């Protein structure tokens, strides 16, 4: 049994991969504890994992409504936060770990871990496309790191492994980083995707955390579906109240509804490009219309990957209702997009990201020390020769 520390933050789509792999490692007999924001205790502790809340890390409230500038500053503050690094080091000082699994976006924590005296072997856990992380996230965060000059790609390269819960078919280019492994998706608890059996129904599900303009986008989508011959299930997440919307009669609105209860029974999905929701939809062979919520985030890259595969369409989040209506109608129809979604669904269902991620972690866990016992000195050939005098010949022997 090894001691594993998982370091995460309260960010939404980054949580399922960390939770799934932590639970799988615990199931295999490892002692797993989690360091994260206090609000995450209710997610990790019921799964049987020891939880420790940050003490010095900056607070992060993804449901608060704020200006774009403040929203961006909040997230960059989380990524570069030195306080999370202090918490990580102090946690290891209190209780050592054999290996640390760190969210790839927690650069401040990762830097502190790599510069700590008495380094600990560690693994980086991504939660979206590797192509976006290296070519979208890394350059602008490096620029914003100021005098600290933190290079995300350099920090990730120093890890024993960098795990990406995706498949090659969705990556914009071949992943060549020597320590990086594509493990396939890590499904949220209770999700076991199967090809959908729904017809004439659609799921509309944007982000479960706040994005500026989210309410306006949902209102346009409601107008778009109002006169379509389709039943719609709407989930607004924790950041938007359905009462803020003018919900048409053909729409069944929920603040929260587990996707596992809906996806098997619809025929297409309207989303914002969140990596977790997108993979779940595709794993049910569902074509998609994606309205990226934030152009600097990964949603635009995820939408482009789905469109490139032929399994969906990308529409600007500020698009008027007629444009959204046309895209939804096209995805509700039969066509090559359904075959493309089914191909991706088959690939996604064929891999188990929690199992493969845990396998990779176990491969780099430090091996237990083995006490070597010196071999006894071998007797000489003379000493090994039997003493004939000790074995008298039996009577009659020649």
Image (cartoon, rainbow, N blue to C red):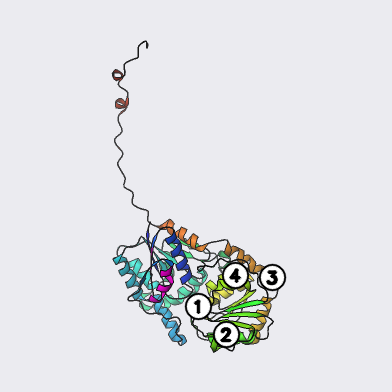
In whole angstroms, how far apart are the C-alphas of marks 1 and 3? 29 Å
> Would you say the residues marked 3 and 2 are in contact, meaning their CB atoms lie under 8 Å apart?
no
Residue 144 lies in quadrant: bottom left
Q: Residue 135: image x %, image y %? A: 50, 72
Question: Which is more N-terminal, label 2 or label 3?
Answer: 2
> Would you say the residues marked 3 and 4 are in contact, meaning their CB atoms lie under 8 Å apart?
no
Q: Residue 313: image x %, image y %? A: 63, 76
Residue that badge 3 annotates = 336
Question: Which is more N-terminal, label 4 or label 1?
Answer: 4
Observer-side mark, 1 or 2, equals: 2
Q: Is residue 9 magenta?
A: no
In whole angstroms, how far apart are the C-alphas of marks 1 and 2? 19 Å
Residue that badge 4 annotates = 282
Give the residues in magenta: 32-46
Instruction: Choose between 137 and 235: the one closer to the eye.
Output: 235
Residue that badge 1 annotates = 297
Observer-side mark, 3 or 4, equals: 4
Residue 386 lies in quadrant: top left
Q: Is residue 57 left or right of residue 331?
A: left
Dot 2 lies on which element? Answer: helix
| Neighbours of disc 2 within 10 Å: few (<14), some (14-19), many (20+) | many
**How would you classify the magenta stretch by its main secondary structure?**
helix
Q: Residue at x 43, y 79 (%)?
A: 75
């Amino acid at each position: 049994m090894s001691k594993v520390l998982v370091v995460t933050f309260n960010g939404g789509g980054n949580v399922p991969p960390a939770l799934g792999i932590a639970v799988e490692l615990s199931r295999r007999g490892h002692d797993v504890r989690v360091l994260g924001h206090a609000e995450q205790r209710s997610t990790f502790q019921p799964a049987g994992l020891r939880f420790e809340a940050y003490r010095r890390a900056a607070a992060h409230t993804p449901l608060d409504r704020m200006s774009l500038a403040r929203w961006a500053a909040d997230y960059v503050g989380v990524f570069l936060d030195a306080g999370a690094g202090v918490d990580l080091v102090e946690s290891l000082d209190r209780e050592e770990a054999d290996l640390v699994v760190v969210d790839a976006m927690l650069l401040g924590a990762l830097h502190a871990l790599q510069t700590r005296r008495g380094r600990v072997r560690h693994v980086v856990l991504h939660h979206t496309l590797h192509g976006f992380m290296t070519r979208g996230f890394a350059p602008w965060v490096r620029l914003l790191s100021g005098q600290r000059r933190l290079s995300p790609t350099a920090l990730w390269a120093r890890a024993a492994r960098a795990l990406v819960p995706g498949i090659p078919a969705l990556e914009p280019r071949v992943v060549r980083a020597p320590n990086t492994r594509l493990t396939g998706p890590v499904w949220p608890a209770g999700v076991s995707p199967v090809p959908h059996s729904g017809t004439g129904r659609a799921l509309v599900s944007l982000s479960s955390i706040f994005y500026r303009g989210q309410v306006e986008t949902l209102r346009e989508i409601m107008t778009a579906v109002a006169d379509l011959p389709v039943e719609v299930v709407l989930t607004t997440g924790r950041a938007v109240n359905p009462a803020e919307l003018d919900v048409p009669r053909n729409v069944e609105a929920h603040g929260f509804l587990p996707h596992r209860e809906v996806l098997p029974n619809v025929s297409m999905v309207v989303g914002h490009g969140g990596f977790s929701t997108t993979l779940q939809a595709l794993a049910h062979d569902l074509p998609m219309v994606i309205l990226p919520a934030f152009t600097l985030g990964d949603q635009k890259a995820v939408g482009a990957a789905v469109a490139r595969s032929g399994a969906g369409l990308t529409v600007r989040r500020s698009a008027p209702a007629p444009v959204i209506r046309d895209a939804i109608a096209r995805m509700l129809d039969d066509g090559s997009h359904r075959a493309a979604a089914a191909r991706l669904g088959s690939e996604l269902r064929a891999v188990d990201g929690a199992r493969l991620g845990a396998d990779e972690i176990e491969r780099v866990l430090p091996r237990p020390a083995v006490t070597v016992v010196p071999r006894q000195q071998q007797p000489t050939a003379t000493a090994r020769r039997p003493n004939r005098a000790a074995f008298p010949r039996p009577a009659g022997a020649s």
